[in-house]
Amino acid sequence: MKDIEFKPISLSDKPIFDDYFNKTDFNNAEKNFSNLFMWRKTYEYEYAIINDCLCIKGKLRDSKKPFCHFPYGGCDIKDSLYLIKEIFKKEGNPLIIKPLLPEMKKCLEKTLEDFTLIEDRDSFDYIYTSNKLITLSGSKLRNKRRWLKKFRENYDYTYEEINSNNLVEAKEFTINIIKNSKDGSDEIIAMEEMFDNLFELGIKGCIIRIDGKIVGVSTGEELTKNTVVIHCERADTNFEGIYNCINQEFCEKQWSNYKFINREEDLGIEGLRQAKLTYRPDLLLSKYIARIEV
């Protein structure tokens, strides 16, 4: 087997990734160059083009065991999977594929044998219609409307887009919130990468201010032609209803022309899971982890 060289992800690789991602209709949050770029140091991401397929390899966050994404784009996915399996075999590792969407799972079942499959509930994406997050209509979202109304009655706030003048301020606010929540250094590194390259990555963002002070920041970008992915949403919870406000305002002012909003996974964090479920997702995008012994 000819040696295949994987190389680290750099900002200049964005057109390559975008080209391959645009060849598929998958709307999982991982199929996004910004997410891969932001988290490339944590997951030690590398990539190679194998049989005209984009193949992404990394290391799991906790165990540091090697894994790869399902190949994106191209016509020779079957052959690419065989070659990736041989690469992992040569390195003495089982082939772990993550994330695996239902459509990918069907393809894998037709391609490789003797693999185990685990449902990865903590990585399910929460996908909503933009209309739902903008209007908050229906009895099941009554409490969301109440919190939003209360916030608007209690606070004289302003909304602004993130630009070159307020970018540093938005970054500092977001990182301080993360530090106070003790989410960890990996999250801080990812946010620093995002804000330091925000415009080059094509990410848009918003700020909510009260009395001139930032109390909320959110960022996102186009994932597919009809879906947006939200990368970051951080706010000062001393202002009751702030999350309801920034969610609704950002969707209405920036993303109303898109049908769906992907608000990513909950990472198994119970409070985050409950918060995302209370918005009644229109789709919980199932994901699996496949392990193929080599």
Image: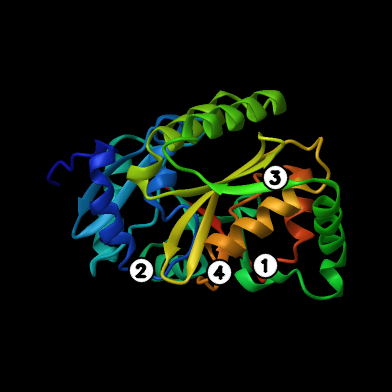
Asked whether disc 4 touches disc 1, contact meaning CB atoms under 8 Å apart, the reply is: yes
Label 2 SS: loop
Q: Residues within 10 Å of mark 4 (few under 14, many from 20)?
A: some
Residues at marks 3 and 4 touching, judged by CB atoms closer than 8 Å = no
Question: Which mark sits nearer the N-terminus, 1 or 2?
Answer: 2
**What kind of residue is marked 1?**
Ile
The local secondary structure at tag 4 comes to: loop
Q: Using the rendered image of the protein, determine whether residue 232 is visible from the camera's viewpoint.
A: no
Specify which label sits upstream in the sequence, 4 or 1.
Answer: 1
Q: Residue sitting at 79 percent across and 44 percent down?
A: 271
Q: Is residue 196 toward the left or the right of residue 156 in the image? A: left
Label 2, on which residue? 24
Q: How far is mark 2 from mark 4, CA to CA?
A: 23 Å
**Image location (x, y in percent) of residue 183:** 65, 29
Residue 154 lies left or right of residue 34; in this view the side is: right
Q: Which residue sits at x=83%, y=44%? A: 240
Marks 3 and 4 sit apart, C-alpha to C-alpha, by: 29 Å
Give the residue at mark 3. Answer: 268
- Residue at image point 68% right, 59% down: 248
